Image (tube, rainbow, N blue to C red):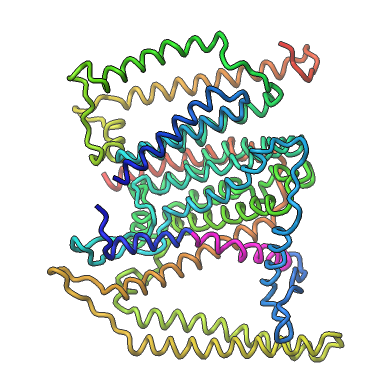
Amino acid sequence: MIEFDLPFILQCAKFLLAFVPLCFIPILIWGERRGASLIQDRLGPNRANIPLLGGLRLFGLVQNAPDGIKLFTKESFIPKHAHKFWYIVAPMIPLCIAFLTPSVIPWFAPMAVEGAKGIANVSGQILDADAGVLVLFALSGLSVYGVVLGAWASNSKYALMGGMRASAMMISYEVSMGLSVAGIFLIVGSFSLTNIVEWQAAHVWGIVAQPLGFVMFLTSLFAETGRAPFDVAEGDSEIVAGYFLEYSAIRFGLYYMGEYAHIAIASALVSTVFLGGYHMPWLGTEVIRANLGLVGGGLLAAIALLCIWIAYASNRWSNIYAKMNATDAAQRKLEYRVMTGLFSGLAVLLLVAGSALALFVHPQQVSVGGTEIWPLWVNLGTAAIQLGIVVAKTLFICWVFIWVRWTLPRFRYDQVMGLGWKILLNIALVNLLVTAVVAKLVKG
Amino acid sequence: MIAQVYFWIFAAIAAACALGVMLSRHPINGAMSLIGTMVSLAGIFSLIASPFMATLQVLVYAGAVMMLVVFVIMVLNCAKDHSTPLFDGAGLFGVLPAAALGALLVRVFVGLDKQATVAMNPQAPRGDVDAISKTLFGAGQHTGGWALLFLAVGILLLTAIVGAVLLAKRHLDSPSEPATIEGGH
């Protein structure tokens, strides 16, 4: 029966990690708007503020709050000819899937902890199945039903066309997506993402071992998430808004959030399979555990540097704004002062905490039944650092998603299909063949 | 204990969805019920220590095959046919296999044949990646030689795809036919 010992509690606590991609949604929406503005040489939404201390705007992040309130409080309209049941159920599907798919992504290295039956191994993924990444592919393949059903239930021609395009594209690109990542599976010899990361830690990152696979996988993911340059399913200039044309208020919001959660999960997958996941060069799991104080202190110092930069920028803007003849000069001056103070204070705190960590924390292994393992707090600290590494890499790939969307023009529908079936699939097959031959020759 | 609870939940969903496939008059409802059955079956697979089979069930059947079915339903716009009859002539083909399966199940579970009792250890790994790949692709002496059959099936599927493309092409390119919306042939 179930024993409520430490490994079991940790296993349950890991379920909280299913919410990590959800936390990406507001950051991604903010990043999309401000990133688009950066690329198009404008400012983007930066006016919404918390009316405290001169109106804190937090770089525009506050904009998410009024957006959310608007989506929740607007009238949720159901068209007269819509098929009610599927119209209501369909937008829920992508967001539900977004809770399930991160279950196979390893957020930290496996840790050995003492349980009731001796030492147990707690891995960094919620679901420790040997089918590994296939579980993720299988579940994310289901999320297209949300798009297709919503499109069909809307009973509108444009929506139906968008849904049909989405389903055709999803089927096409799933093939090249699977084949382009299969090279890594061949080299590693496992579907489990923890094994893939451990192999990358022992040898080279996947992007070096499979550069072609990386490019093709990323391209397929752009199509799979329905992002520009492959957003033919939405195609504003051709079919108005595609599958969510008839949706309003929070039902539209569910699609919107599902799309961004999908991007976050796809980015986490790319960073795990091709960018080493929780591994950083010269910072292997054992290195972090043995020097937890130093590594944690260094990380805090890096964050402190970022805070110092923000404080410096706020101060500079405060001076520039003071010279401008703006009507809200007094308010803005106060806000920039508050930001400068806030972030310099944060930087000082982080630096003090970081130095304390580096000076006073020296983990020692403990012996449990003759085996040397690290104490729990060392494992948890390492897990936190490694979670930070994965999140940082994922944020980078998310930025690549945004960057590509606002750089490349949209493809025509037949061009998207041609790229998928005539180019990507063939390159992926040749890549797989060459990888198989090389892997056979090297591994024997 | 927990596994049993989960089994009954999955079994109930699977059975209810199977009934839904039979009884729903709307093609989309039927297709979605079938997906529900497949996903619950995947859950049961993973309960008997075959997580890989469960994954493939979702990936291939619920994800790809049913996606195509739904796509076809949408393209042909069966949404207009709200009055599909529950049973028609084609349904007779299902009676014989169903009866055969029922007889088999009765024989096993009612215990008419003591030899045929189901003896299995649900904990023993049987459907994991390693076992399946060794059985399916192993080229040694003690394997069933399924690899050849696998290749043969691949060639068969390829032939079918090429044939379908050829048929569709001839239909689309024929210049003599005027473009009609309903396509009455």
Q: Which residue is drawn at 32% across and 27% down?
A: B147
Whether residue B184 is situated above or below residue A168 in the rendered picture: above
User: Is residue B15 found left or right of A397 in the rendered image?
Assistant: left
Q: Does residue A268 appear left or right of residue A8 in this picture?
A: right
Please name whichever residue, B148 or B22, is drawn nearer the observer in this view of the structure: B22
Quadrant of the drawing holding the C terminus of chain A: top left
Image quarter of residue B11: top left
Q: Residue at left 39%, top 13%?
A: B99
Rendered position, A277 above or below A373: above
Reply above or below: A295 against A135: below
- Residue toward you, A127 or B29: B29
Q: Position of residue A276 (x, y in %)?
A: 42, 61
Tell me if B122 is positioned left or right of A242 in this view: left
Q: Give the range drawn in magenta.
A: A19-39
Q: Which of B125 and A211 is in front in this view?
A: B125
Nearer to us in this view, A55 or A441: A55
Q: Magenta span has A35?
A: yes
